[in-house]
Amino acid sequence: MKLKKRPLRWLLAIALLVLFAWLLRHFVFPPAPPQYLTATVAKMDLEEAVLASGTLKPVKQVSVGAQVNGQLKSLKVKLGDRVSKGQLLAEIDPVLQQNDLKKAEAGLANVEAQKRAKAAQLVQYTLALKRQQTMIAGDASSRADLESAQAQLDATRAELAALDAQIRQSGVEVDTAKANLGYTRIAAPMDGEVISVVTQEGQTVVSAQSAPTILILANVDTMTIKAQVSEADVVRVKPGQAVYFTILGAPDKRFDGKLRAIEPAPESITADSTSTTTAVYYNGLFDVPNPERLLKTSMTAQVSIVLGVAKQVPAVPVAALGKRGKDGRYAVQVLKDGKPQQRQVRLGLNDNINAQVLDGLKDGEKVIVGDPTQAAADAAKQDQAER
């Protein structure tokens, strides 16, 4: 009988120990209240902007080419030189063009000589016709001789008209040859700076199909920025909005401007395609002065197109925002007396880090941006999955 009571006592003792441990944990060492990561609603300056990547180009750029064939005899400028409109840039060996001009002038002189000879014949045939008319009046000549004299005169007049046409044609050939000779001296079409020398002295240029480029001139006093705006953002931007950008070489220097235009079609559009599987970007154009020549052609610009600015307005971190309701308001958890309370707030500007609070929250209130316990659990799960 004693043996049967002993296991019962052991079970009773274990139950008492478990009860004691539970009472000790919940009353002597109560669990710590949940801890939350919070942020305070505070006033700050906000700027909402569309970010884009851009490329710098001179406001005006011209490829100066050759319109005639020949060897580049001399180059009068070098890379980086500033030139004025009309200034001589290069010369092509003019021998071929000089010979073409001489040939055209000789052809014109030949036709003019032929015209003078025909003009002399015209005088002769005119006198002969008058004699025949006088003689036919006195029955001293035949009707056939009169008709022959008239035909010779008419033919000579027609030949003179043809020679006049040939003279005009030869004159055009002379003018063309003179123009081609003038093209051997290449002058600057605009004020600018030599940003590229494509053809060197001694090279032969052939303009049979297209004008070969000798050098490239650009006006770098003002630079144009082509900012690639995504199709998701292009509906929010419009000409006249403030724009600023930085470059990789001077990230702390800000260049300001105003959006001049949005190109109506992306650069990738083609005549025979209506859809594409790649991202679509539209060029936003704006100009900035470049008096210090700090901005160079083809530099990359980190562009911000300003949609709106708010000064010293209450704001909360974007991380505190919950789901957006049908009325456009966002759910936010507010920590009050150590407990979270849900609020519906209306927001204004959003710079992707902080959002302007229009109503629903007051300055100084604390909003929950995260639960460290849950964050630690998520990190542990991710670490275990990576292993």
Image (cartoon, helix red, strand yellow):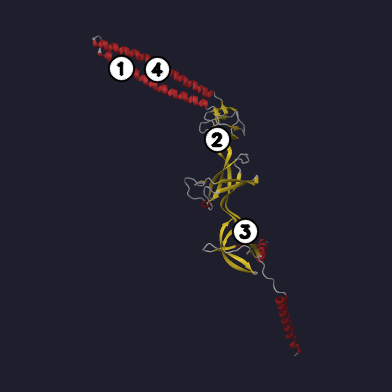
Q: How crowded is mark 4: few (under 14 residues within 10 Å), some or many (20 or more)?
A: many
- Of the pair 298 and 158, the residue shown nearer to us: 298
Determine the CA span between mark 3 and mark 1.
Answer: 107 Å
Residue type, numbered disc 2: Ser
Outermost left residue: 139
Q: Name the residue under label 1.
A: 151
Residue type, numbered disc 3: Lys
Residue 289 falls in image quadrant:
top right
Residue type, numbered disc 1: Ala
Q: Specify which label sits upstream in the sequence, 4 or 1.
A: 4
Q: Nearer the viewer, mark 4 or mark 3?
A: 3
Task: State if disc 2 and disc 4 touch (CB < 8 Å).
Answer: no
Determine the CA span between mark 3 and mark 2.
Answer: 54 Å
Asked if residue 305 is positioned above or below residue 99 in the image, the reply reads: below
Q: Specify which label sits upstream in the sequence, 1 or 2.
A: 2
Residue 122 falls in image quadrant:
top left
Task: State if disc 2 and disc 3 touch (CB < 8 Å).
Answer: no
Q: Nearer the viewer, mark 3 or mark 1?
A: 3
Q: In which quarter of the image is the C terminus?
A: bottom right
Determine the CA span between mark 4 and mark 3.
Answer: 95 Å
What label does residue 63 carry, if any? Answer: 2
Task: State if disc 1 and disc 4 touch (CB < 8 Å).
Answer: no
Q: Mark 3 points at which residue?
A: 43
Q: Residues within 10 Å of mark 3 (few under 14, many from 20)?
A: some
Q: Mark 4 points at which residue?
A: 115
Q: Specify which label sits upstream in the sequence, 3 or 1.
A: 3
Does residue 236 appear in the picture of this structure?
yes
Determine the CA span between mark 1 and mark 2.
Answer: 60 Å
Q: What element carries label 4?
A: helix
Residue lying at 55% horizontally and 38% vertically, measured from the top left: 60
User: Residue 117 vs residue 65: left or right?
Assistant: left
